[in-house]
Image (cartoon, helix red, strand yellow):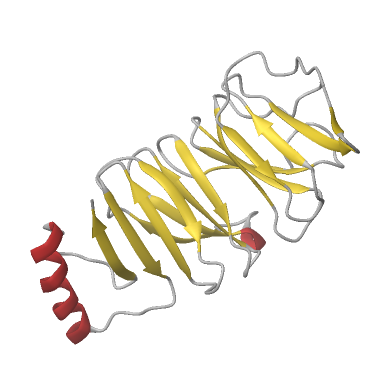
Amino acid sequence: MKFGGHIDEGYAIDWSPVIPGRLISGDCNKCIHLWEPTGDSWKVDSTPFTGHDASVEDLQWSPTEANIFASSSVDGKIAIWDTREGKKPKFIFKAHDADVNVISWNRLASCMIASGSDDGSFSIRDLREIKNDSLVGHFKYHKKPITSVQWSPHEASTLAVSSDDHQLTIWDLSLERDEEEEAEFKAKVKEQVNAPEDLPPQLLFVHQQ
């Protein structure tokens, strides 16, 4: 097949978990294209989805809705799109003060989406509250850009986060502060990776590369 839609390099692509063969791709020119499977090839809509003010960095289909996907961008925003409702985002909101490098849609709790930023922070949002304050949690443990966020396929409240600081962290958002356990864990982790004093209780594990 010949496709001339993207006129710039791109980093974002995602297969639909609902419709086999369907995918979306995004580029540095702020454009997103939808690929529809047609037997042994794809039909690509030459008119892009547009709404971001800078490069599209990541894309994620909804795990349950065939026509809904999310995008993140260097403009610090996350957009939610419906392929049935034109080429503009259904919702778009400021997610971070820096580039939003990565996003992950929770497949076990489909209302939850995680995002990781160039400033080392990551956030969790409840899409049911998207018109209001959808922020569930904001964490600033990592010291360099977030390179990946990934929800666990087995535990709805657990996710992994990696960063350019050479650390991989595992988080459980269901945990609350336990002073005794926190003191033991803090001492152990600080000895290993020189962690900060104010470790969040949701931090389960740190791997230093």
Residue 92, compared with residue 51, is above or below; it is below
Q: Image quadrant of residue 176? A: bottom left
* Residue 69 spot, x, y in % from top left: 70, 46
In the figure, 78 relative to 75: above or below? below
State which quarter of the image contains the N terminus.
top right
Q: Position of residue 66 (x, y in %)?
A: 81, 53
Q: Nearer the viewer, residue 38 or 200?
A: 38
Q: Position of residue 37 (x, y in %)?
A: 86, 38
On screen, residue 130 above or below 181: above
Residue 49 image position (x, y, % from top left) = 74, 29
Pick the front one: 201 or 66: 66
- Who's the residue at 32% across and 60% down the image? 169
Residue 159, located in which quarter of the rendered image? bottom left
User: Residue visible at 25% across and 44% down?
Assistant: 165
Residue at 58% x, 25% y: name it: 10
- Decide which of 129, 16 is in the foreground and name it: 16
Left or right: where does residue 169 sit relative to residue 63?
A: left
Residue at image position (28%, 67%) is 200
- As drawn, the residue found furthest toward the front would be 40
In the picture, measured across the screen, residue 8 lies left or right of residue 23, that is left
- Left or right: 47, with 205 as reference point: right
Q: How many marks?
A: 0
In the displayed structure image, the side of residue 123 where residue 181 appears, left or right: left
